[in-house]
């Protein structure tokens, strides 16, 4: 019984400061912090709106074209194709066409 009474008095003593009304200076600090948070939130929302507008108007970039290698030798089979000149020439000019 005495243990319960001591426990109850201890809890009441420790919990009593949390039940008091905040002082005026505490309320002033809270109001000031709240006003600062509201201003910060407005700045964040404005920046997000700006970024959303930029994202809507931004065009996606095309990937860069691969660079052309002018020294590359292409092997084109000409075994069954009609040719003019020597079949074993050092340079062969191939003409491609599509008759559709």
Image: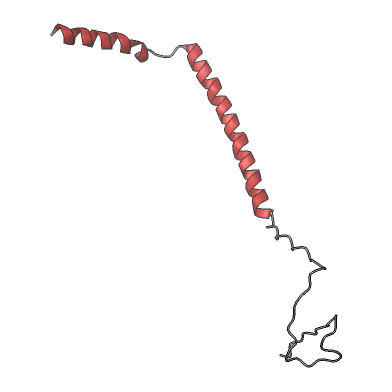
Picture coordinates of residue 29, whole percent (x, y): 53, 17
Nearest the viewer among 90 and 83 is 90
Measuring 54% from the left and 22% from the top, which residue is drawn there? 33
**In the rendering, at what x and y percent does residue 66 appear?**
74, 63
Q: How is the image coloured?
A: secondary structure
Q: Quadrant of the C terminus?
A: bottom right
Res 75 quadrant in image: bottom right
Q: Nearer the viewer, residue 14 or 98?
A: 98
Q: Is residue 34 left or right of residue 13?
A: right
Above or below, comparing residue 94 to residue 55 in the picture? below
The quadrant where residue 87 appears: bottom right
Residue found at x 17% / y 8%:
3
Name the residue located 83 percent from the left edge and 82 percent from the top edge: 92
In the displayed structure, 17 sits above or below 34; it is above
- Quadrant of the frame with the N terminus: top left
Report the front residue among 58 and 78.
78
Asked if 97 appears above or below 33 in the picture, the reply is below
At x 65%, y 45%, the residue is 51
């Amino acid at each position: 019984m005495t243990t319960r009474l001591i426990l109850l008095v201890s809890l009441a003593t420790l919990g009593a400061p949390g039940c008091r009304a905040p002082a005026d200076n505490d309320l002033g600090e809270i109001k000031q912090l709240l006003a600062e948070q509201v201003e910060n939130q407005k700045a964040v929302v404005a920046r997000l709106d700006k970024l959303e507008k930029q994202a809507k108007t931004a065009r996606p970039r095309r990937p860069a074209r691969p660079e052309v290698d002018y020294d590359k030798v292409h092997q084109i089979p000409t075994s069954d194709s009609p040719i003019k000149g020597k079949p074993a020439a050092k340079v062969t000019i191939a003409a491609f066409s599509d008759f559709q």
